[in-house]
Amino acid sequence: MQEKKGKKSVEAASGNATHENEQNEEVVYSYKHPHPSVTTDCVIFCFDKKDLNVLLIKRGIEPFKDTWAFPGGFLRMNESAEECALRELKEETSLTPGYIEQFHTFTEVDRDPRERVISIAYFALIKKSDVEGGDDASEAQWFKVKDLPPLAFDHDYIFKKALTALKQKIHFEPIGFDLLEEEFSIPELQRLYEAILNAHFDRRNFQKKLLQLGILEESKHNVKRKANAKGRSKNKKWRFILKKYEEMKTNHQFRLEF
Amino acid sequence: MQEKKGKKSVEAASGNATHENEQNEEVVYSYKHPHPSVTTDCVIFCFDKKDLNVLLIKRGIEPFKDTWAFPGGFLRMNESAEECALRELKEETSLTPGYIEQFHTFTEVDRDPRERVISIAYFALIKKSDVEGGDDASEAQWFKVKDLPPLAFDHDYIFKKALTALKQKIHFEPIGFDLLEEEFSIPELQRLYEAILNAHFDRRNFQKKLLQLGILEESKHNVKRKANAKGRSKNKKWRFILKKYEEMKTNHQFRLEF
DNA sequence: TCAAAAGTGTTCGCTATACACCCATGG
DNA sequence: CCATGGGTGTATAGCGAACACTTTTGA
């Protein structure tokens, strides 16, 4: 069913590859049938007070030189696609996301003008606090999801699919917390959900719904007040209880829907 | 960013490839860096009265000779992955599914003992009536999902993921109809949902829920009876109104959840 | 002939929705 | 000081869950 492994043959090769070199410059890999190149691309999201943002990198070479694109690169033979996505992200932006998930593989024949390239695409989430300081004045830049520049290759399409996948996911799983700090307020959480789902919720119903899930606990720093106090209290912060969530999930007691 | 296209070089190559030949036997494809092989695999489902089934093929060669595996094969340079999956399915089983969807790409380094192979996996749905007759006594065979034999490579894992993807999908989209005939009864539909979701529903609530969606219409062949008739009527058949569903979907009026 | 399956209708309780008040916060 | 935002409580409607009876179906 499957092709015999291509021989490593020592043969002079013309053309200058821009692939990250792994070892011997003189080695050429030959196959009896053409193999596509395999890359990963990563759509990494970050939430900033009000807006959902994605990280883009300005391409330094043709094609699409000086056009924005998602970070990514070639799959190496000794790493899985997810490892590749994380490695490229770290190399190009020095970021390590708190959450990453594969969402689609793009295989259209002409998606790269140079050669056949298929791309295994991931979306990732990172906290704002994990981003600050990592800015090494590189070609990477955060853009509001609502206001993206033109993108290279089929990355417009990839982005659409990434956003859809993120929406789908957050509909049923509490992954939003990977975009917030350890402690957050309910309104913050609500703004996040509204930004991602592009919707509006009633404050009180949103709060009730989230608290009823039983996966949030009050911060220890919240100001305590007398039992008979009236009106609103000081701003409260909350924490996501991962353990409780996993426990409920394994017992099939968890149900979330937006 | 990306590697220069591998030169086609006319060079004698040893080793016998089992890849479907595309053209010249003497041509060898060379790259400065190793490329993984890219295949597609397809988990095709069929529903038979009570049971959900998947199609497997007995492997004719090593490794995993005589072990069951999902149909699939190598991606060609002039086809997308979905085209590849459909082509392989047709070549190996002469089937054409009514629905197909990519659900995951498997990239673990050691998933194939011979060489680095990544597999873009699809799940597909086909009606029972489109299967019968296509049986050319080949190595293909349907198995109950509840009673699968040991599978080759990481196909156990692929199957798990496929089933999860199917469940997820049918939770919110009416794709079940691609597993039923044009006309079907509500109990049939219920058995299908119960088989896929591995759950049990109340007959009356299930019926109410489905009919309230507004995407089903009665068959013209249903027996009409007097308005004042009591008790149950003759068995009814229904049809899925695709147009209505698409219309509701574009207007965001469609909402289904199980 | 009779057990199993399938069509039909009603009640009840919960939860999603809609909505009002008070006060901390910060310019 | 005041506009904005954030904490808290209640009333209602609609939907999902639980449930019984009758007749058709087919072994």
Image (cartoon, coloured by chain):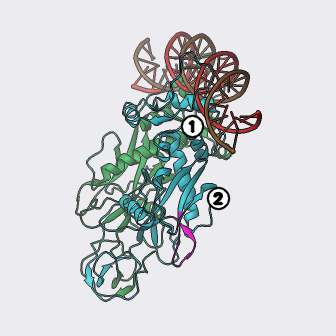
Chain colours: A green, B cyan, C red, D brown
Going from N to C along the chain, the mark reached first, 1 or 2, is 2
Q: Residue at x 33, y 55 (%)?
A: A137
Instruction: Please provide percent x and percent y for residue D27.
Output: 69, 45
Q: Chain of mark 2?
A: B
Q: Secondary structure at mark 1?
A: loop
Q: Nearer the viewer, residue A140 or D10?
A: D10
Q: Amino acid at mark 1?
A: Phe
- Label 2 Cα neighbours within 10 Å, binned few <14 / some 14-19 / many ≥20: few
Q: Please tell me whether residue B235 is drawn above or below residue A26 in the rendered image.
A: above
Q: Place residue B28 in its image quadrant.
A: bottom left
Q: Nearer the viewer, residue A14 or A118?
A: A118
Q: Amino acid at mark 2?
A: Asp
Provide the major secondary structure of the magenta segment. Answer: loop
Q: Are marks 1 and 2 on the same chain?
A: yes
Instruction: Please provide percent x and percent y for residue C14.
Output: 66, 25
Residue B180 seen in this snapshot: yes
Q: Nearer the viewer, residue B221 or A192?
A: B221
Instruction: Please provide percent x and percent y for residue A198.
Output: 40, 34
Real-space Cα separation, disc 1 to disc 2, in angstroms: 25 Å
Magenta stretch? B56-70
Q: Which corner quadrant holds the N terminus of chain B?
A: bottom left
Dot 1 corresponds to which residue?
B258
Q: Chain of mark 1?
A: B
Q: Which corner quadrant holds the C terminus of chain B?
A: top right
Q: Secondary structure at mark 2?
A: helix
Examine the structure image and report whether residue B143 is included in the region drawn in magenta: no
Left or right of A18 in this view: A51: right
Residue B86 - label: none
Q: Which of labels 1 and 2 is toward the front?
A: 2
Residue B147 - label: 2
Residue A218 seen in this snapshot: no
